[in-house]
Amino acid sequence: MGGKGIYLMNIRQAKEEIKRTVAAYLEKDEEGNYLISERFCRPVLLMGAPGIGKTAIMQQIADELGINLVSYTITHHTRQSAIGLPVVRERDYDGKKVSVTEYTMSEILVSVYDKIEETKNDKGILFLDEINCVSETLLPTMLQFLQYKTFGTHKVPRSYVIVCAGNPPLYNRSAREFDMVTLDRVKKMDIEVDREVFLEYAEESRLHGAVKAFLDIRAEYFYRVRTDAEETYFVTARGWEDLSEILFAYERNNFDITVDTVSEYISDPEIAEAFHTYLTLYKKYHEEFAIGSILGGDLIEGSDDVRTAPFDERLSLLHLLFDALSNDYYTYSMDLKKQKALREEILSKKDFLSMDELDLEKEKFESAEDMRQDRIAAAGKHTENVFSFIERTFGDGQEMVLFLTMIGRDVYAKEYLSDIGSDAYAKHSKQLLLREQKAELDREIRLAIN
């Protein structure tokens, strides 16, 4: 929109920049005055391909900053709902009564004030999606909104930061270009598609293992938009995320997952068929590789068939192993949160409970803690057994490096290993670091000699 900027951000970088922007716009001095004048608080404008997470990060930002979020897809609005309904009022000018048109408050601004009343928190973000895809009748209103932060005759509260998002015309035929006058009044961020950032997010949001493995193997299928004479075919990050959820649901209910099921989310026949084929193999690998036996330590070394298997099969095995471990790490994180919450609950009630009631609460806590410790111990054994299997089967080659990479981008694995630790993980991470340092030293020596 208005041409791509010189600098492109991935969605993670955009999230951090928006957080900094919100903090700066809302900063006050000791007397409670805003340090940045409202005139300089440009609305943020995110421009990027659809389905890469622009909307998803907004709630994360609001939650992390402890502020409200009011979110609208502006293409769902008419001019009347966006700016309010016209009302004719009488005013006195130079002693004469004159009829003038004013507007009732916009439905969008009503939602902002309702949120403030509901939460008793006056700080927030007003997020409007598809800002450059509105109808002709609403376009002037949106341009006025971006330039003056008003809907009709009503302003957005100063304590709310405006963030908008749009899609370039390449991806949306109804998208419009904004002129220089408008772009010169916004803080524009151009967002690029980034598979690595998505895979890191995938670990945190618990995407289906087959989706993560497939995108590791077939990176070129992560995001695609193509058009022929009859139709537009597309695959987005949102599509993979939504497909993941339906895969979990179908598996819980033992429903068949057909290529038609996949194509409902992955709107490119070539990629939908490729993923469905891989999903079938992924399930087959789970049985053939005896993941449960590896976790339990019953299978300490793979066969020659595993060692010499094609790369995509070896990578699939690593994903299957990591998915099994990641369930342990996720359980650890959830158990820890539950125990902390239970402890806080008991402490908050202790002055109001009898000794017998307090003893029962303590027994409940201790029983849950015993089970939590058992699961921690099991996770530790599983971790050691998996590392032992990979080392005995593949040595410290690329398979070990890939497995360490999977652990390194998983937020729950990092939490578990930071809190509990693992001798095997520490050992192999240290070996990898030493190898990388040696390789860098060798490179510097070669450069010095040459």
Image: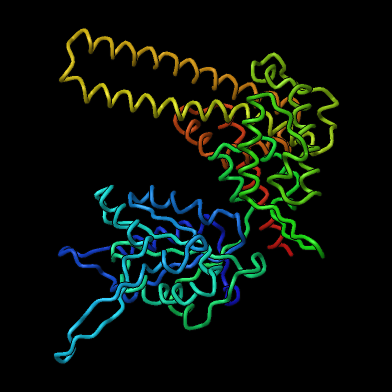
Instruction: Residue 40 in the image: state x and y as whole percent.
Output: 34, 75
**Residue 30 sits above or below residue 207 on the image:** below
Q: In which quarter of the image is residue 317?
A: top right
Give the position of the C terminus as an image quadrant: bottom right
Give the image quarter of residue 290: top right
Residue in view at x 80 percent, y 43 percent: 274
56 above or below 37? above
In this view, which residue lies farthest toward the bottom? Answer: 94
Which residue corresponds to the image point at 21% horizontal and 7% vertical from the top-left?
A: 356
Residue at the location (62% across, 55% down)? Answer: 194
Is 338 on the left or on the right of 351, as rendered?
right
Compare residues 52 and 291 and report the one nearer the observer: 52
In this rendering, position of residue 102 left or right of residue 203:
left
Q: For the N terminus, which image quadrant?
A: bottom right
For residue 445, which quarter of the picture? bottom right
Q: Residue shown at 73%/33% (left/top)?
A: 257
Q: In this view, does 314 lie above or below 200?
A: above
Q: Where's residue 272, x and y in %?
A: 77, 45
**Residue 261 location (% of width, % of height):** 72, 39
Colouring: rainbow
